[in-house]
Image: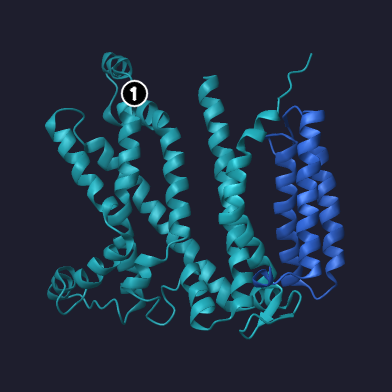
Chain colours: A cyan, B blue
Amino acid sequence: MEKTTNQRAWFLVLPVLILVAFSSIIPMMTVVNYSFQDSFGGNEFFWVGLEWYRELLRSERLWDALGRQLMFSSIILLIEIPLGILVALAMPKKGWLASLCLVLIALPLLIPYNVVGMIWQVFARSDIGLLGRVVTDLGFSYNYTQDAVDAWVTVVAMDVWHWTSLVSLLCYAGVRSIPSAYYQAAEIDQASRWSVFRFIELPKMRGVLIIAVLLRFMDSFMIYTEPFVLTGGGPGNATTFLSIDLVKMALGQFDLGPAAAFSLMYFLVILLVSYVFYTVMIASDKAEAGQ
Amino acid sequence: MDWMAWTLPTALFFASIATALAVMSVLAIKRPSTPRVGVLGIETARGDRLFLTLLGSAFINLAWIGLTDLPQTFALGICAVFAFATFRWV
């Protein structure tokens, strides 16, 4: 006889569903409604059909912002994941030094997003900021408010500073959960440090690494406050990521219809990526459980 | 409800999604499905396949809007084929 799943338990989540309906589903329905209409204020709306979607999908603005967003997420993942692993492996495993390291590493995570942006805005200024002055005094031409490359370097550095800690902490938890028998076996086999990492630590960290990649990708894909405070999306549109562009459209230009269409497309991309990551995570868990 | 700016087409759209969810909930109780591994190589239950259908249909419609000037009904036809394929083979 085939095993079946009893779905009745889903009724137990009804209270949460009602809460989610008021906090998410109803606002989302409103956004869908707005995306097919034009408004000039005064709660008056005019049906425009698919016009906003057509306009956005054929405009360079959306694709440029999406390109910048994907590039930013890729760059920070390429830096933060290996760096986070390195930091986790280098951290002391026991004693007061381990506790001290954990506290120090967790500090950037406790700072509010807008404060991080503010810190880096001052820190990177070439006239008064410590980083800006040092880089300028070393003979490099650096000004993140006027040069697109400098702005990108600064935004990436700020994100790496703020979020590598999270990857490190997750990896540290993964490394700490490896039973000492694995290390003893490796020592008996006279395995090199690289082999220990490649065949013991990395496979054992797989679960937490997938979570780290998922969290960092989603968070970087929705980044708004830090780059907005630091560069305001500039110079020009160099650091205008999707969320910054969306806010400019919705609040700056008060184009509610196009902004609603933009939001929905942004949401769909995030939903798709989340689903892919979720599927990979579940498959990874099952593979690990089957080992 | 004025602030939600309802229109008949969007109301029908949400009503159809709500109906699909209600039908799936009733089906899940009356005839619980067994998860299976399809062409994507991932385990899916009936609800997963509905989710994939809705998500895929959204992207099919967006691609149609962005790439052609033909009526959207063609895209809906593609979505119907996509839905059939998803429920049959995924």
Q: In this view, does A274 lie to the left or right of A164?
A: right
Q: What residue is at 42 percent from the left and 29 percent from the top?
A: A203
Q: Out of A29 and A181, give the one closest to the viewer.
A: A29
- Residue A158: image x %, image y %? 29, 62
Q: Is residue B9 left or right of residue A282?
A: right
Q: Is residue A272 visible?
A: no
Give the quadrant of residue B44.
top right
Q: Is residue A72 above or below residue A257?
A: above
Q: Is residue B89 left or right of residue A15?
A: right
Quadrant including the N terminus of chain A: top right
Q: Name the element at disc 1.
A: loop
- Residue A121: image x %, image y %? 25, 72
Q: What residue is at 68 percent from the left and 35 percent from the top?
A: B41
Q: Is residue A94 left or right of residue A68?
A: left
Q: What residue is at 52 percent from the left and 29 percent from the top?
A: A285
- Residue B87: image x %, image y %? 81, 41
Give the quadrant of residue A76.
bottom left
Q: Out of A139 and B72, give the one closest to the viewer.
A: B72
What is the three-letter code of the residue carrying label 1? Answer: Ile
Name the residue carrying label 1: A178
Q: Is residue A243 visible?
A: yes
- Residue B5: image x %, image y %? 69, 72
Give the quadrant of residue A73.
bottom left
Q: Residue furthest front?
A: B1
